């Protein structure tokens, strides 16, 4: 992805979150120069990968297969006592986050506003296979069963709890607009806890055609 595209997407995301009356922490708006000399006091931000994160999953087609998110809080096993994480995400109409499950993380996915979020589900039968058994889960605490490959549509205010080993992919329903998605979960580790159904790249390769306006989590190692 080009840095110019990333800069534009972050600017659009800031405007969208503001339209949802959702406020990000002050450092979400820092420029690269604002981070200089703050490696010590901002260690938790860098170590736990808080902040702006986006990917096209190696597709080269961000608006068809991609995701932009802001990790608000996160722990790190063996480094601190925080056992939870929270993310704010923006999912466009028919923009897919590919099929995957988590080895360790249990999560609630929440539609916080905007359009409808469609989630397709399978149980896993081994690392890269779908089970033919129904998926038993809870939406807003209500027990339900979904057939393999079945879809759950979350309207604003609704949520789903996804346990470890449940394959899921999601996208915004066509014609309903962008979706403001929240995630509340156990500690998040995007470097080792994702099992994708097909081999893909989690973090994008960036072409630096212009300087960054705001840093991504993958930029911290350079600037901090």
Image (cartoon, grey):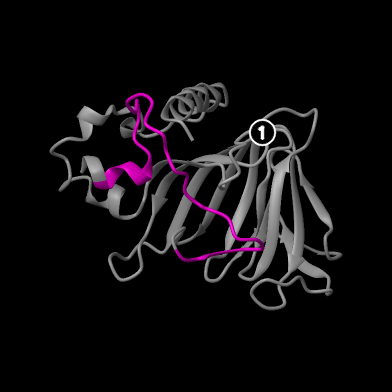
Look at 72% across and 72% down and name the residue there.
Answer: 129
Q: Is residue 187 left or right of residue 61?
A: left
Q: Nearer the viewer, residue 66 or 93?
A: 66
Residue 203 is situated, as x and y percent measured from the top left of the image, at 47, 49
Question: For the view shown, which residue lies furthest in the left direction?
Answer: 37
Which residue is identified by label 1? 92
Label 1 crowding class (10 Å Cα cut-off): few <14, some 14-19, many 20+? Answer: many
Please tell me whether residue 27 belongs to the stretch shown in magenta: no
Residue 1 is situated, as x and y percent measured from the top left of the image, at 49, 35
Residue 202 is situated, as x and y percent measured from the top left of the image, at 51, 52
Residue range corresponding to the magenta coloring: 192-221
The dominant secondary structure in magenta is: loop
Whether 55 is drawn above or below 33: the answer is below
Please tell me whether residue 212 belongs to the stretch shown in magenta: yes
Q: Nearer the viewer, residue 62 or 145?
A: 62
Residue 9 shows up from this direction: yes
Residue 15 is situated, as x and y percent measured from the top left of the image, at 51, 21
Q: Nearer the viewer, residue 48 or 185?
A: 48
Q: Secondary structure at mark 1?
A: loop
């Amino acid at each position: 992805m080009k840095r110019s595209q990333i800069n534009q997407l972050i600017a659009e995301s800031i405007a969208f979150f503001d339209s949802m009356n959702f406020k990000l922490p002050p450092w979400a708006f820092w420029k690269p120069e604002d981070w200089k000399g703050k490696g010590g006091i901002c260690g938790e931000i860098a170590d736990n990968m808080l902040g702006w994160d986006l990917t096209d999953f190696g597709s080269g087609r961000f608006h068809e297969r991609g995701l932009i998110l802001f990790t608000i809080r996160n722990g790190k096993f063996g480094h601190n006592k925080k056992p939870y994480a929270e993310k704010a995400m923006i999912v466009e109409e028919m923009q897919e986050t590919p099929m995957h499950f988590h080895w360790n993380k249990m999560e609630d996915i929440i539609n916080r506003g905007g359009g409808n979020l469609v989630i397709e589900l399978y149980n896993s039968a081994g690392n890269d296979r779908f089970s033919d058994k129904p998926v038993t889960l809870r939406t807003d605490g209500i027990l339900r069963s979904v057939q393999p490959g079945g879809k759950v549509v979350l309207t604003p205010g609704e949520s789903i709890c996804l346990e470890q080993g449940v394959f899921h992919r999601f996208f915004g329903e066509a014609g309903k607009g962008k979706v403001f998605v929240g995630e509340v979960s156990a500690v998040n580790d995007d470097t080792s806890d994702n099992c994708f159904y097909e081999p893909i790249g989690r973090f994008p390769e960036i072409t630096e055609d212009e300087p960054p306006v705001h840093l991504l989590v993958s930029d911290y190692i350079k600037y901090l």
